[in-house]
Image (cartoon, coloured by chain):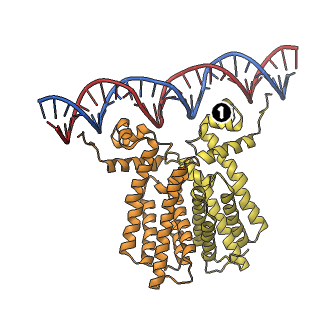
Chain colours: A orange, B yellow, C red, D blue
Amino acid sequence: MARPRQFDEQKTLEAVAEAFWAHGYEGTSTRDLAQRTGLTVTSLYNAFGDKQSLFQLALQHYLDTTLKERIHRLEESLAPTEAIVAFFNEVIERSLSDVQQRGCFLVNSALDATPDAPELRAAIASEIDAIRAFFRRCLLAGRRTGDVPSTVSAAEASAHLLAVLLGLRVMARVNPDRATMTAAVSAALKASGISKHR
Amino acid sequence: MARPRQFDEQKTLEAVAEAFWAHGYEGTSTRDLAQRTGLTVTSLYNAFGDKQSLFQLALQHYLDTTLKERIHRLEESLAPTEAIVAFFNEVIERSLSDVQQRGCFLVNSALDATPDAPELRAAIASEIDAIRAFFRRCLLAGRRTGDVPSTVSAAEASAHLLAVLLGLRVMARVNPDRATMTAAVSAALKASGISKHR
DNA sequence: AATAATATGTATCGACCGATACAGAATTCA
DNA sequence: TGAATTCTGTATCGGTCGATACATATTATT
């Protein structure tokens, strides 16, 4: 028994995420967000709470629609080793096609999160570990199918692949160069017992 | 024919760097810097220019005294492959011993630098490439001494090691875990033809 | 000692920050 | 239709931001 919201919350969170993604938490004002979303500051506060919770909601929305979607889609439609290869390929293509060179919202947030926001840090750490878990599942599944030699430690290789992925995202932000990125990925895949050709 | 400066510029830049390192550019106010250095805002502006140039000077000071010093020291005193191993070991130990979990000032700055600061981005990209050049020199030298097999491409392996290093720095900021870090480094070193034991 | 030049400290500028009070518009339920 | 409830827009709050003007203190040169 009340007036319904006159804007699309999902679209709004996407616009908010893009603003935070490009300029960071401190570098984005609530007025910027209002202009970017086409709403008023009041509506934003009314719908999503204060700036901190708005940031977390936008980050979560980004993760759900981008990262988790990617993991789920690749893991379901491709063979284990192919899923890992495709994952890296998508990250590279995304990094190179973004003219704003925003890198990864999650990684940006990881470095933007100051020590005095422990719950945010914990949430980010959890999401990052989910990526590692994805690598680990693929590696173990690949071992069962015979695509990954049993001499490769899943724990070690998944940590290794995660580090390379995070490193790629830093490169994407500051200097996205295809040759460097593909070289790094190629070496990492070889080390994990995954042949390059897909 | 004038009054000499009554503070140590190097010490001041170190204090400034630590503040920016921990809280980022936008998250550190000029008043924070004044309190942290024990100076007045006026003195800071008088000696170093505005906030932007103060940031760049502090970053440069950090790089000269930490990163470049480390590269120079290791490259001069150790065998090529040992220099790489020692480099990663130092990074891991530093990451784990920092209770503030600040990660790497250079990497933090890389992600903090917005797209509308191209000269800063270029400077950061240049510094990052210097790390890759260090890896490359070590790999090529290691090949000459026979410690690195000639089947390892120096271009590919240096990009790979750089990605792992940057990834480690992200991990250090959000969740510094020794097991994950050492696993990632161990796999990367093996892939580069560098035996783990030092 | 006189003078020129620089450093320092206080006070303050205009702009922007996050956040909210308040009133009016809009919509659902009775 | 009437009333309760929620949303939206304007205006504004106190605080902090980066930056600077100004006066004073301090030092090197003449």
Q: Residue at x 39, y 65 (%)?
A: A70
Q: Position of residue B154 (x, y in %)?
A: 62, 72
Quadrant the N terminus of chain A occupies? top left
Which of the 4 quarters of the picture holds residue B168? Answer: bottom right
How many circles with numbers are drawn on the protein? 1
SS at mark 1?
helix
Q: In front: A99, or B58?
A: B58
Coordinates of residue A35 in the picture (x, y in percent): 37, 39
Farthest-out residue, bottom: A146
Query: Residue B122, can we see it?
Result: no
**Chain of the residue that carries numbered disc 1 in the rendered image:** B
What quarter of the picture does the C terminus of chain A occupy? Answer: bottom left
Question: How would you rate the neighbour count of disc 1 (Cα within 10 Å): few for under 14, some for 14-19, many for 20 or more?
Answer: some
**Who is closer to the viewer here, A157 or B126?**
A157
Q: Is residue B112 visible?
A: yes
Residue A17: give x, y in percent of width and height. Answer: 41, 50
Q: Residue at x 45, y 73 (%)?
A: A85
Residue B128: x and y in percent read: 61, 58
Above or below residue B94? Residue B139 is below
Q: Which residue is mark 1?
A: B45
Left or right: residue B153 compared with residue A134: right
- Residue type marked 1: Tyr
Note whether A28 is above or below A175 in the view shown: above
Q: Nearer the viewer, residue D1 or A71?
A: D1
Q: Is residue A182 above or below residue B68?
A: below
